[in-house]
Amino acid sequence: FWTLFHGQNDVGELPGVTKAEQVDDARDPVQYVTSNQHVVLAVPTTIFEAGETINNFTIFSFDPEKNDRGDYKGWAYLGSVAAGGENSANCGDDLPTPCVSSTGKLSFAPPVSGTMPVIRVDMSGTQVEGPGKTRTLGANDAVDYTFDENTRQYQQPAGN
């Protein structure tokens, strides 16, 4: 079966996932162009699970060299990074869980090594700290994700 490159609808395969997360139109995608001209694209996504809305960014990369060399899978899935959420469907005065809401702002930083950038998510808002307790998020709650060459995914370093 042959398909024109520009006629493809595939932008990456999600391993082990039967259904992709819903794209969140309320937030903007963020992109970064690496030194070797690959595009790293962070697509805002959201899921609803157990009374909570969970915001993420699903990360893809595009390799422009793969568009004319017989391997037409130029897009690759590089994982997902957490970017906040809220629990309004599962909280309140008559429930044990306090209401919280947080937002993560994604930005790219130059790579420490290699060509893939560091992804930083700066958090704001509130999160559950313990039974009946909340905590305000600030600068110390920022999370950096680095690209792991072995797994080909963005991961949060241990201790971060």
Image (cartoon, rainbow, N blue to C red):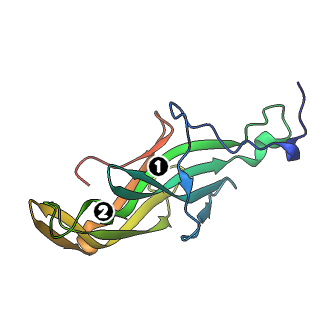
Read off the residue under disc 2: 87
How many other residues sit within 10 Å of disc 1, few (<14), some (14-19) or many (≥20)?
Answer: some
Classify residue 28 as left or right of residue 136: right
Classify residue 82 as left or right of residue 135: right
Which residue is at 73% across, 37% downward?
Answer: 73
Which residue is at 42% across, 53% downward?
Answer: 48
**Rendered view: 61 above or below 30:** above
Measured from the top left, where is residue 6 in percent x and y?
Answer: 87, 47
Mark 2 is on which residue type? Asn
**Rendered view: 129 above or below 126:** above
Residue at the top extreme? 1
Read off the residue under disc 1: 80
Label 1 – label 2 distance at C-alpha: 20 Å
Q: Is residue 141 visible?
A: yes
Q: Quadrant of the N terminus?
A: top right
Measured from the top left, where is residue 55 in percent x and y?
Answer: 43, 59
Which residue is at 26% across, 55% downward?
Answer: 160
Camera-side residue: 62 or 104? Answer: 104
Measured from the top left, where is residue 3 in percent x and y?
Answer: 89, 34
Q: Are marks 1 and 2 in contact (CB under 8 Å)?
A: no
Which secondary structure, mark 1?
A: strand
Mark 1 is on which residue type? Ser
How many other residues sit within 10 Å of disc 2, few (<14), some (14-19) or many (≥20)?
Answer: many
Which secondary structure, mark 2?
A: loop
Camera-side residue: 22 or 12? Answer: 22
**First in residue order: circle 1 vs circle 2:** 1
Residue at the front extreme? 94
